[in-house]
Amino acid sequence: MSHSSHIETQVVHAGQTPDPATGAIVTPIYQTSTFVFDALGVHKGYDYSRTANPTRTALERCLATLEGGDYGLAFASGMAATDTIIRLLKPGDHTLIGADVYGGTYRLFKSEWERFGLSFSVVDMADLASIAAALQPETRLIWLETPTNPMMTLADIPAVVELAHRQNILVCVDNTFATPCAQRPLELGADIVVHSTTKYLSGHNDVVGGAVVVNDAGLYERLTFLQNGAGAVPGPFDCWLTLRGLKTLALRMQAHSANALAVARYLEGHPAIARVLYPGLPSHPQHELARRQMALFGGMLLVELAGGEAAARHLCEHTRLFALAESLGSVESLLELPAIMTHASVVGTSLEIAPSLVRISVGIEHADDLIADLEQALAGLA
Ligand code: P1T
């Protein structure tokens, strides 16, 4: 599959050819841990499924193509992918992370990686001057989420890359919220793309997974060593489910984005809502950057309830269609209170999320039904 074909075509075909043994059009689930050698030192390209498995290879090639990259690696979760990237660093190295990265990413920096001599600073990635001021001689990595989880803040990827590359600093972009349908960070100059494939890429709330995509052969070699060496790999069935979900990614992202815009506009006009943060709304402080950098604005939004924490809790507990749950990016609409759910691990730090904020993952149901559900849930508050 060439990188020049359209993403609607790539999601269906990239990395996948009819099965050489049977002609099966769908890549089979190669549910095997080991592969028989033809002779000593001679095999058909696979020897052990921690190292490589054909279902995983298909997924890895598909992910690489979608991100416009040369090399893809699949992991057992988004956090396993993140942890593997951090292992590229050595004691004494310094990383910049955004002011509202996913709580689990912050938690590992604070409670684990710091213990191994990896220091980090938290910066507002929307502000280039803050990034420049936070750089140290030891800085080796800038970790961006754009849009961020959950504040929906954007980082100007090419501008950050320009700053970073002057000092040989790697730029890693967590592209989970945007997906390659909306934004391809490698094409904007980033060195590494990371995903929780648990979210939009698999898209159906039925599998946990992660991915890394790079262009540099040396980085790929190191990451492959770590993927095999530490072994946080996904099983063949999980890879197959992710490939299955990916086939409709382009269609789903159109639906997520259209629904999210409709919901965002509705909520922006509701008296119980003090603020809506959605990159597709002209009121988003970085709407111009969003238009420049993103082909779609995605399905995630954040709302602040005028009535504070009590109102936010009320909304979370009174929807019927939107399910109260962690995670995001699936066909089903979800909502949650980051302060006590996904981002509980940053309570008491400068990254704390206000309890009046509700994160909404808009699914692909009919927009009118979603708005009617929010209407009835907010009725008691307006
Ligand atoms: O859950 P896992 O597949 O390990 O991915 C971690 C992760 C990484 N990056 C981002 C931007 C994420 O949102 C996540 C997981 N986030 C949630 C579970 C959540 O509800 O926000």
Image (cartoon, grey):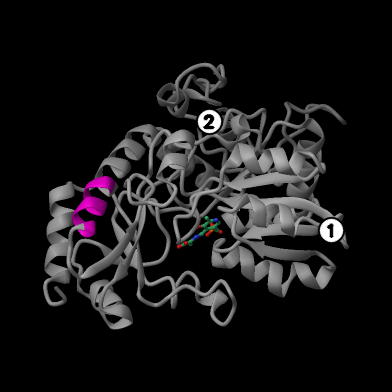
Find residue 231 and report its horizontal and vertical position in percent: 72, 53
| Cα–Cα span, label 1 and label 2 | 31 Å
Q: Residue at x 82, y 57 (%)?
A: 136
Mark found first going from the N terminus, 1 or 2: 2
Q: Which of 290 and 315 is in front in this view?
A: 290
Taking the image as shown, residue 218 lies to the left or right of residue 367, namely right
Q: Mark 1 points at which residue?
A: 93
Where is residue 224, by image quadrant?
A: top right
**Disc 2, SS:** helix
Q: Is the magenta stretch mostly helix, strand or loop?
A: helix
Q: Nearer the viewer, residue 333 or 15?
A: 333
Q: Mark 2 points at which residue?
A: 66
Q: Residue at x 18, y 58 (%)?
A: 269
Position of 87 relative to 242 (above/below): below
Position of 3 relative to 123 (above/below): above
Q: Nearer the viewer, residue 250 or 267?
A: 267
Find residue 303 and report its horizontal and vertical position in percent: 32, 64
On the rendered image, what quadrant is the N terminus found in?
top right
Of the numbered discs in the image, which one, if any, rests on residue 181?
A: none
The three-letter code of the residue at mark 1 reads Asp
Span shown in magenta:
261-268
Q: Is residue 15 visible?
A: yes
Q: Which residue is drawn at 52% across and 38% down?
A: 29
Taking the image as shown, residue 255 lies to the left or right of residue 270, namely right
Where is residue 3, by image quadrant?
A: top right
Taking the image as shown, residue 293 lies to the left or right of residue 357, namely right
Q: Is disc 1 surrounded by few (<14), some (14 to 19) or many (20+) residues within 10 Å?
A: some
Q: Which residue is drawn at 26% across and 41% down?
A: 258
The three-letter code of the residue at mark 2 reads Leu
Q: Which of 247 and 155 is in front in this view?
A: 155
Viewer-nearest of labels 1 and 2?
1
Position of 49 relative to 278 (above/below): above
